[in-house]
Amino acid sequence: MSAQLQESYRQVAAAAEAYAIAFHEGDTNELGRLFLPDCKLQFVEDGALRRFAASDWIAIVGSRASAAAQGHAPDFRLASLELAGPDCAAVTIEMTSPPNRFRDVLHLLRIDGTWRIVAKAFHRDLAG
């Protein structure tokens, strides 16, 4: 792997960790910095596609007690990271925010030197 791709890999992994920590802490400012405003979040619930804007999801995160505020330790792991090039990546991250366990697939692009989440699809199960 070239030095440029190695640096991209490191930066994407750092962005994914920042996402997981911001979600755990309910840090809406950091989430707003990480997501493009018009990013769509999509998932399937009861067999039906559900989707909403990242800005709406960030408002939901901000309106409830975070896992950190409830006394839970951070629980996440980077399951995969793939670079399609120096400015394009896909990440799968597993996170627990009781009572839920999430498996998020994030697509990121480096825009003006900053890695931003441009799409998110996820699956949710009950933790445990």
Image (tube, grey):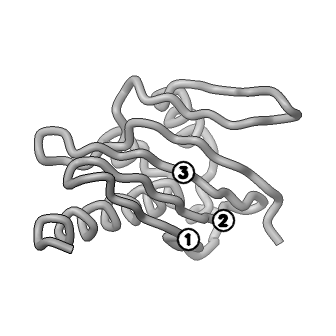
Amino acid of disc 2: Thr
Marks 1,2: beta carbons within 8 A:
yes
Q: Where is mark 3, residue-wise?
A: 105
Q: Is residue 85 left or right of residue 91?
A: left
Q: Earlier in the sequence, mark 3 or mark 1?
A: 1
Task: Answer whether residue 29 is visible to the viewer in this image.
Answer: no
Q: Is residue 30 above or below residue 16?
A: above
Q: Residue at x 20, y 54 (%)?
A: 86
Q: Where is mark 1, residue-wise?
A: 76
Task: Answer whether residue 57 is visible to the viewer in this image.
Answer: yes
Where in the figure is residue 15, as x and y percent of width and height? 33, 59
Viewer-proximal residue, 90 or 30?
Answer: 90
Viewer-proximal residue, 14 or 121?
Answer: 121
Q: Earlier in the sequence, mark 1 or mark 2?
A: 1
Front tag of 2 and 3: 3
Front tag of 3 and 1: 3
- Which element type, helix, strand or loop, lies under badge 1? strand
Residue 72 quadrant: bottom right
Where in the figure is residue 106, as x and y percent of width and height? 47, 48
Residue 61 quadrant: top right
Amino acid of disc 1: Phe
- Which element type, helix, strand or loop, lies under badge 2? strand
Query: Which quarter of the figure is the C terminus placed in?
Result: bottom right
Spatial CA distance of label 2 from label 3 is 15 Å
Q: Where is mark 2, residue-wise?
A: 96
Q: Is residue 47 above or below residue 65?
A: above
